Image (cartoon, rainbow, N blue to C red):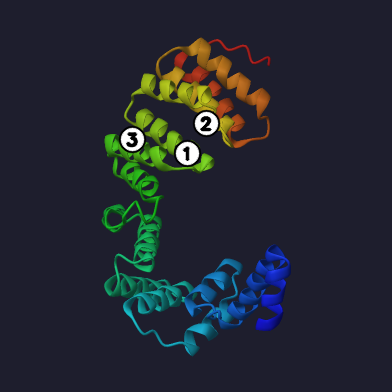
Amino acid sequence: MEYYVRRLVRTNPLTGLLIILAFCSVIGSGWASPMHWLDEIEQHYLTGNWQVIERILRENTPVNDIERAGKSFFEAKIALQKDECCNYLEKTVRISPQSIYGQRALIELANIALLEREYHASLDYLLRVDPRTISDRDYLISSVYLKLGRFTDAIRSAQDFIKITKDNLKRELAYLKIVEAYILNEQYRQALLTLETMKKQDYVVNHPSIVDFKEGYSLEKMEEYSEAIDKYKYIITQYPYSEYAFRAERRLYDLTLNNSQKIDYSL
């Protein structure tokens, strides 16, 4: 082999170089290490191959804290009972809290606590997450602060998330969390300004009906009834079979009932 390569290099340097690179590539591929078993589990996790994951977990013994944390994390993901799942997640955090598996376990525990309406517990888990590792941390914290009625903190966390995210959909939802915080805190002018910013910056991606409804609701609460009514009628026209068309109709009914507003229902 060496003889032929040398001859090719003498007669055609470029061709010889390409053959040498190809030869090294073939040799290197034979020496390539097999995929790590945790990486293999990650692939099967994305496709939901739970039986394969269970088999890989049985067949491999962790040799360090990262592997032990990874094994515990995926044992949590295949657990059938909530208590068993939580126990494995807590174990993952104890083994290696700063590893990617420990951080993911904290997020999972926070989401479980949030679903259980244990908002303080959820917040405690999230505050242990490094936003450099899990970029969605501040997005989730904003949701918890909203539930706790800590509106200023909810706004600040959503703004922190907006600064770093590249996810257009979640950016839109984070802005809507800010709007919701302003509305719940009865800061309707600020809510309107945020909604206007979303439209000007083209941050309205998938939820234009929500944006329009929040505008109408804020205008109504500011007693700008004529503009609110026009906005509600617009929603009914533009999104006739949506949840927000129904809500807009309800707001028009309440305006008639509670504020003696004479409303022309023609669209």
Q: Quadrant of residue 134?
A: bottom left
Q: Residues within 10 Å of mark 3 (few under 14, many from 20)?
A: many
Q: Quadrant of residue 250?
A: top right
Real-space Cα separation, disc 2 to disc 3, in angstroms = 17 Å
Q: Quadrant of the N terminus?
A: bottom right
Residue type, mark 3 in image = Ile
Residue 176 in percent (x, y) is at 45, 34
Query: Residue at 41% across / 30% down in the picture?
Result: 179
Q: Which mark is residue 155?
A: 3
Q: Earlier in the sequence, mark 2 or mark 3?
A: 3
Q: Earlier in the sequence, mark 3 or mark 1?
A: 3
Q: Secondary structure at mark 2?
A: loop
> Cβ–Cβ below 8 Å for labels 3 and 1?
no
Real-space Cα separation, disc 3 to disc 1, in angstroms = 13 Å
Residue 44 in percent (x, y) is at 58, 73
> Cβ–Cβ below 8 Å for labels 2 and 3?
no
Q: Which mark is residue 171?
A: 1
Residue type, mark 1 in image = Arg
Q: Earlier in the sequence, mark 1 or mark 2?
A: 1
Real-space Cα separation, disc 1 to disc 2, in angstroms = 7 Å
Residue 25 in percent (x, y) is at 62, 74
Q: Is 251 situated left or right of 142 in this image? A: right
Name above or below for residue 56 compared with residue 243.
Answer: below
Q: Which mark is residue 203?
A: 2
Q: Secondary structure at mark 1?
A: helix
- Closer to viewer: mark 3 or mark 1: 1
Residue type, mark 2 in image = Tyr
Q: Quadrant of residue 98?
A: bottom left
> Cβ–Cβ below 8 Å for labels 1 and 2?
yes
